[in-house]
Amino acid sequence: SQIETALPIIRSEFSRLKIPASNDKVYKDECVFSFDSPFSDTGLYVNLSTFKGVGADFLDLDSERSGSKLYL
């Protein structure tokens, strides 16, 4: 099932997750590479390691650059 496939990936990424502090900027209003927003057809994904928002077309690029696999 999808859950059985996803759980090992999620567990392996736990050490990379950060909780944003009060002085951390979370880029959740617009993609850092394009003009995609949470209101775009495919939405906006926030990298849970860097807190940068990316559109669906840039998920692979951001994941490759950051090494992160978890997005909200």
Image (cartoon, rainbow, N blue to C red):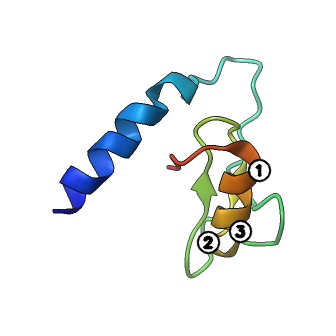
Q: Which residue is mark 2?
A: 56
In the image, residue 71 sits, relative to residue 59, either above or below, namely above
Q: CA distance from mark 2 to mark 3?
A: 5 Å
In the image, residue 17 sits, relative to residue 55, either above or below, namely above
Pick the front one: 7 or 47: 7
For label 3, count other residues whose C-alpha is less than 10 Å away and answer few (under 14), some (14-19) or many (20+): some
Q: Amino acid at mark 3?
A: Phe
Q: Quadrant of residue 50?
A: top right
**N-terminal-most mark, 1 or 3:** 3
Q: Amino acid at mark 2?
A: Ala
In this rendering, position of residue 16 left or right of residue 8: right
Of badges 1 and 3, the one in the foreground is 1
Q: Position of residue 30 (x, y in %)?
A: 75, 60
Q: Quadrant of residue 26?
A: top right
Q: CA distance from mark 1 to mark 3?
A: 11 Å
Callout 1: SS: helix
Q: Which residue is mark 1?
A: 65
> Residues at badges 1 and 2 in contact (C-beta under 8 Å)?
no
Callout 2: SS: helix
**N-terminal-most mark, 1 or 2:** 2
Q: Residue furthest bottom?
A: 41
> Residues at badges 2 and 3 in contact (C-beta under 8 Å)?
yes
Of badges 1 and 2, the one in the foreground is 1
Q: Which residue is mark 3?
A: 58
Q: Residue at horizontal 76%, vertical 62%?
A: 31
Pick the front one: 8 or 59: 8
Callout 3: SS: helix
Q: CA distance from mark 1 to mark 2?
A: 15 Å
For label 2, count other residues whose C-alpha is less than 10 Å away and answer few (under 14), some (14-19) or many (20+): some
Question: In this orientation, does residue 6 appear?
Answer: yes
